[in-house]
Image (cartoon, rainbow, N blue to C red):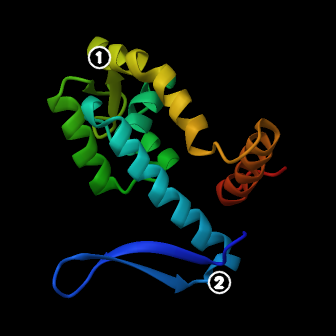
Amino acid sequence: MKDKSLEYESASSNGEASNKTLDLSELNGLIGFLIRFVQLNLFQAFFERFQLSGLSPGEYSTLVAAQANPGANQGEIAAALMIKRSNMTKLVNGLESRKLISRSVTKEDKRAVKLNVTPKGRQLIDAIASDIVEHDHATVSALSVHERHMLLGLLGKIADQYRGVQS
């Protein structure tokens, strides 16, 4: 990193915005800190770009996962996306109230709830799919195509480590 300090805008005690530069050089050497910093900024960019769709990153991920895995239950999708059970229930309730997803109980296990993307949900996914890809590329515009692929590979390797996947 060129500059080992990060600038942030904070509210002063009187509520007015003030720009301060803090020395975060020790934190900038920690992968977890940088990933979290980037994640927060990526989520903020997602909310700004897709506010009209009404979807959060978690809702979008849930819709895409449910569409790609027909018959998967809510718990399986929550586990795969690392969404807490209580948060997943609220998230699915919201998607269901907007008629983007429907739930059905399986015959084998009355406790398991299958998620089904509705035609309206599929239409929304299709409508924003190219914007999602464009947004994803724009968020890492500081990287070359090669660097983007490298980053995806490295992050995938770390994700696999946490999933317990052997490489």
Q: Position of residue 142 (x, y in %)?
A: 67, 48
- Identify the disc placed on residue 143: none
- Horizontal relation, residue 42 to residue 85: left or right: right
Q: On screen, 162 above or below 34?
A: above
Circle 1 — which element?
loop
Q: Residue tagged by mark 1?
A: 118
Q: Nearer the viewer, residue 4 or 161?
A: 4
Numbered tag placed on residue 25 in the rendering? 2
Numbered-mark total: 2
Mark 1 crowdedness (10 Å alpha carbons): few <14, some 14-19, many ≥20:
some
Circle 2: is it few (<14), some (14-19), or many (20+) Cα within 10 Å? few
Name the one closer to the observer, 71 or 12.
Answer: 12
Residue type at tag 1: Thr
Instruction: Please provide percent x and percent y for residue 76.
Output: 46, 41
Residue located at (51% from left, 85% from top): 22
Horizontal arrangement in the rendering, residue 54 relative to residue 75 (left or right): left
Q: Tell me which corner region of the image, top left, top right, bottom left or bottom right, holds residue 158.
A: bottom right
Residue that appears at 48% across and 47% down = 81
Q: Is residue 45 above or below residue 18?
A: above
Residue beneath the point at 47% across and 32% down: 65
